[in-house]
Image: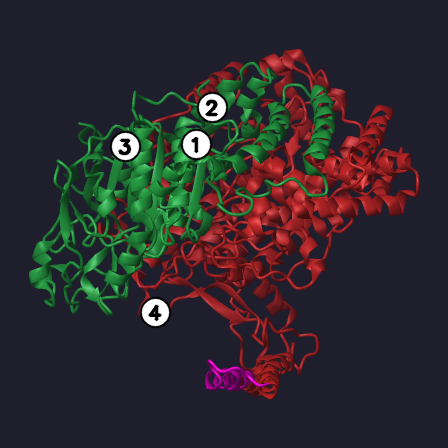
Chain colours: A green, B red
Amino acid sequence: MNRREMLCKSGFGFGAIAAADLLAQDGQLAAATEFNPLAPQTPDFAAKAKRVIFIFLQGGPSHIETFDPKPALQKWDGELLPESFREFDLAQTNTADGRLLGPLFPYHRHGESGLEISTLFPRIGQHADEMAVIRSCYHESFIHGAAVTIMSSGTILLGHPTVGAWVTYGLGSESDRLPAYVAMTDAAFTNGVACISSGFLPAIYQGTHLRTTGAPIMNLTPLKELGQDRQRQLLNQINQWNTRHRDARPHDSRLDARIANYELAFRMQTAAPDLIDLGSESQTTRNLYGLDGEETKQFGGMCLLARRMAERGVRYIHLASSGWDAHGECRKNHLENAKKIDQPIAGLLTDLKQRGLLEETLVVWAGEFGRTPIMQGKRGRDHHPYGFSCWMAGGGIRGGKVIGATDEFGFHAVEDRVHANDLHATMLSLLGLEHEKLTYLFEGRERRLTDVGGSNDLAQRLLS
Amino acid sequence: MLKITWVLFLAVIGLGHANLIRSATANDDYWSFQKPVRHPAPEAGQLQHGARIVNAVDAFLFQALEKHGLAPAPAADKHTLVRRAYLDLIGLLPSPEQVEAFVTNPSADAWPRLINELLDSKHYGERWGRHWLDVARYADSGGYETDIYLRNAWRYRDYVVKSFNDDKPYDQFVQEQIAGDELWPDNLDLDPKRVYHITADQKKHLEARIGTGLYTLGPLIHESRLDARRLHYETLTDWADTTGSVFLGLSFGCARCHDHKFDPLTQTDYFAMQAIFASSKEVEIPLMTAMEIGDTRQAYPKIVAIDEARKRYRLYEQQTAGKTLSSEEQTHKEKLLIDIAQKVLALPAGAASVPGTRYDGLMEIPTVSVLGHEQPALLKTVHRLERGELYGMKEQIQAALPGALAQATDSEVDLPKPYGSRKALALWLTEPDHPLTSRVMVNRIWQWHFGRGLVATPNDFGAMGQEPTHPELLDWLATEFIERGWSIKDMHRLIMTSSSYQMSSQHISEKAVQADPENYLLWRMPRRRLEAEALWDAVHTAAGTINLKMGGRPVVPPLAEDEIASLRDTFRWPVSADPQEHTRRGLYILVLRNFRFPMFSVFDAPVSSVSCPTRDVTTVAPQALWSLNNRSVFSQAQAFASRVRKEAGTEAHDWIDRAWMIAFARHPTDRETREALSLMDTLSQTDTAAPVDALAQLCLSLFNLNEFAFTD
């Protein structure tokens, strides 16, 4: 029986098939792997990328100031947009009377490819030949909440699974002691945990929020009244009673799964603190990520943890960088924010590469939208979903290339348009999953991450 | 693959149709679009296990079993039954005394009497109301970035609880939620002449109108509120989809973009459903008489005084900014602060004209969010949208019933406009020969008793859903439901007094396991894990700390630092001041769409953005971490231990017996008693320097047992 269909159609006995890989280890259930929803899955076709590190810039970084040079915009500085743009709504500004604002940072060419990247990201620029920049992203909403929902789950509607949940559902987990889908943030997640939700997929696929201070995962620390020794004694007795209870109730693998989960929980109590303990990392590594720099230490720590998770088999790692909503002074805002992430992200790419992990790790950099070519307030920019940039590296991508383009103002994506659905189709494709085949029956329809879109799958072009 | 297996299975056992997926044209005779046909129940005398047949439920189930050479499991023991009944009907553990009273009662009607007692309990509505809230996608906030607080959603929750407790006929329950305002317009958009009194009738009509709150608690994009066209469209989408899923058991969502591939629902049907709601809007109406509202105006200077006191404090703060305050200045500043507090405390808590009438929060008039009508001048037309895209506007669509379904009931398709179409929809849905309404609800009731519906996809009675395992039983129940005046409690009585419901879940028959491992034919009672709220309630009932107060504003228990870490703005989790409120039933805990109460989230509480017909039951390690390590669980274990000591004297044996009775509704075996004693000994001796309350640890271990988390 096919696991996906089993999950789709059973609707009832999901618990009956959970966590069975653990049972397999304990030799408790012969058909374990077949029924374990988190067992590693064979992708639809061979692919290099095995996991994803998604770096999500919350608030919406300006494409014009980062990866989409618009020298022509400089000469329009202070002018009105042409008439043809005026039917397009923006969040807080008006296309009819907004004045254009020229680019706030110069661009440099990097690497052999000569990829143009703004001076905000000098260190990321050193990886230009690894990076594929997509300059023609777009979607339908200029509102943060809805845009985050689209970028993370492909639709404006709440309650749909996020990319990480789909990927975990499609590929399973490679770790028996850490969650498959982990999310970290330097402040808070826009939309709260909805941005890492499993939506209508079973909750087993939801993202786990990992913290870098205190207990990394909720309820991870054994009660101080007990300590590990007594907890072990208590667990042994719990296991004995649960096993006897189970023996009197054969053919109910939910009971087996629960027994196994107590052992997994026990292992997590050690594995998760080990994960966040950076004591074993060398000074060279610390420097690489900027762990000792005031501005870089927080995001650097997150990037280093991302690498440690990649090594430990975590499937999907979501890193949120906050504060990019530059309505006011865009220059100041972007300078401050870029300083926090430039070195850490560059360090992550370097480190993944030197450890041979970059080929199998897809790194994606994107915000929920870009920012308007017209000015808001004191040289700020408003939300802009009609054309913006993202980039990808690793996972077999041949870098140093640009896909798509916006018009001369950086307003509309005009060439090779890439909707959020296309971006998601591309990510799945790079992981060896066909976006039209990765489905789940919900409310009468075989649902997809890409809904009815995703026809502009860039994977082949990114890989060649 | 499973679908095929399932179809083959059905074909083999002679149930349902093997031809599950049909072309759209062949669908006019699709089973769920035909009126239920009542076949007489098989005669007991003709069946092998006829002697055990109590009512038609058994007759149909046993007949299907017999066809496949299977037999119903023997009855469960009385200890199992009493725990099953309590958890199923009221969601609370029976006390040891309640267990003893039932198991020692030899009378033949002990079981039906127990069921009646539980149905009479006001906690029944809390348990079954929570099931309905899943379907209603209930939440106290709107989701998306700002997750705005829906301050009146709880009134709908209380309406649901009361409706179940009152055994409100289901047809009325449906009518109220869809069109309470249009059917009973004489409620409360307060008549200014009605100074002191709201008549009993008007109160009833007001309650009906609160039912329309269903439509006001969906997901809400709030930020900027600028994308007005899109917002209107998303709201109508939520309303049409919710109506389809909740009442029709049909997922309309697909028809938004294209004609439904498998069901005879067209895109026009879909937008016609949106058009039914297009003249409606959310309104907030006061729940006080004009007189009581007048009282708040009279007291309004007290609000002004608070504002002035706050300004006074801020002014002083500005004047002394950057300065080291002398002790007099410090005292003065504190006095200003105290002044604010005193003025807040001086606010009246309720209306002076009618004692006992309470304001919400700081002298806010209590209100309720319900459906009302948009003004004629502001009405928007509904258009068919190409691929469901807002910018693909096609022809205008009028309010109408779904064509194929209206045909099945010989109903007029077109509806009144611009107002009154909700009323027409509600009346049509509750016509006794409507093919879906009663089937969908009896199927939900069945699912909430057995864990799986006779149709396993309760929100999808269309061709993409599953066909019923027992079509004749489903139709028999659907017609019986209507004959019994749409009484949900009567359906509980019917189902629970059947032999089938009383079967053992532990029974093993190798033949049945081979033939029907998934127990589709119900050869034994399915075992069920407690849902998140039920588990929360069970822990607190065992501990004796549960506060059974009913209704009111959502309660907010405190969270440990690691539990609240994912919440951006902790002000969104305003912890209830009274510790008694922290142990209310799970039903009453604040439901934020962006931040589910962490324990509920771990135990599969629904995301509540769309109707949730069936909860997942996952088994994940964070569940084990919660019951092993969570501090609030541990404090409940300590309370459990104190209760046991108080109720069972000084002997450890008696403690153990009591604890087992509380947690599992049975006495421990001798072996279990020995093991429990030995565990307590071991824990005490492990580290004598750090003594533990071994009984509390034992109680904690009971919370971690499968026997605790499951009902047999």
Q: Amino acid at mark 1?
A: Val
The kind of secondary structure the magenta stretch mainly shows is helix
Comes first in the chain, label 2 or label 1:
2
Q: Chain of mark 3?
A: A
- Residue B1 vertical position relative to residue B629 in the rendered view, above or below: above
Is the residue marked by circle 3 packed among few (<14), some (14-19), or many (20+) residues within 10 Å? Answer: many
- Residue B133 vertical position relative to residue A169 in the rendered view, above or below: below
Q: Residue at x 84, y 42 (%)?
A: B98
Disc sitting over residue A394 in the figure: 3
Q: Which residues are magenta?
A: B306-326
Closest to the observer: B665 or B476?
Answer: B665
Q: Residue at x 22, y 33 (%)?
A: A457
Q: Amino acid at mark 4?
A: Pro
Instruction: Tell us which disc is closer to us: 1 or 4.
Output: 1
For mark 1, give the secondary structure. Answer: loop
Q: Position of residue A158 (x, y in %)?
A: 41, 48
Q: Share a chain, discs 1 and 4?
A: no
Q: Residue at x 64, y 15 (%)?
A: B512
